[in-house]
Amino acid sequence: VQLQASGGGLVQAGASLRLSCAASGRSFARGTTAWFRQAPGKEREFVAAIRWYDGSTFPADSVKGRFTISRDRAKNTVYLQMNSLEPEDTAVYYCAAEPRHLIVSSVQSSSEYSYWGQGTQVTVSS
């Protein structure tokens, strides 16, 4: 299984970016894909997750109203649309996937995900 994350970059505060996470190698038809981020000197933080089979989404409180996670089944790709970016959003963003069904209380836990992408850098200048 491979997860290819892309779409990061350097933007000014208030701008938007869309990250992509393309999965190959197996089906995640009943699983969950998520985005996490890690800023320098900080622990990895949950950003948002989506269930493949019904499209249910689980955004972190810190990004609600600004970030939207979505999926394209035909392309086996998950997106993270990030609007109104703030300097505090600067981090390496990782996508993660788990083929099992995850209960709601588990989707925010990085330890529940078996597959990880390589990360893409997002830098927001003030």
Image (spheres, rainbow, N blue to C red):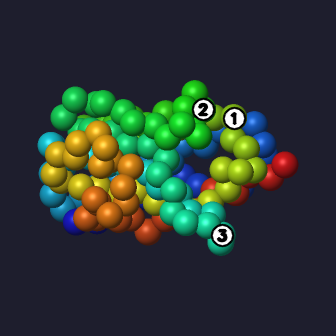
Q: How many marks?
A: 3
Question: In this image, 94 relative to 52: left or right?
Answer: right
Instruction: Tell me the tag on residue 9.
Output: none
The picture places residue 117, in percent across and down from the top left corner, at 39, 64
Which type of secondary structure does the marked residue at label 1 adopt? loop
Q: Quadrant of the N terminus?
A: bottom left
Question: In this image, 31 relative to 84: left or right?
Answer: left
In this view, the residue in front, 39 or 124, is 39
Instruction: Tell me the tag on residue 40.
Output: 3
- Residue type, label 1: Ser
* Residue 97 in view (yes/no): yes
Residue placed at 75% from the left, 50% from the top?
87
**Residue sticking out furthest to the front:** 105
Q: Earlier in the sequence, mark 1 or mark 3?
A: 3
- Find disc 2 in the rendering and name its residue: 66
Q: CA distance from mark 3 to mark 2?
A: 22 Å
**Residue sticking out furthest to the right:** 126
In this view, the residue in front, 122 or 103, is 103
- Find disc 1 in the rendering and name its residue: 84
Q: Is residue 68 above or below residue 120?
A: above
Which type of secondary structure does the marked residue at label 3 adopt? loop
Residue placed at 37% from the left, 60% from the top?
110
Determine whether label 2 and label 1 are within 8 Å by CB: yes
* Residue 21 in view (yes/no): no
How packed mark 3 is, by other alpha carbons closer than 10 Å (few <14, some 14-19, many 20 or more), is few
Q: CA distance from mark 2 to mark 1?
A: 6 Å
Q: Nearer the viewer, mark 1 or mark 3?
A: 3
- Residue type, label 3: Pro
Q: Earlier in the sequence, mark 2 or mark 1?
A: 2
The picture places residue 4, in percent across and down from the top left corner, at 38, 61
Question: In this image, 102 relative to 14: left or right?
Answer: left
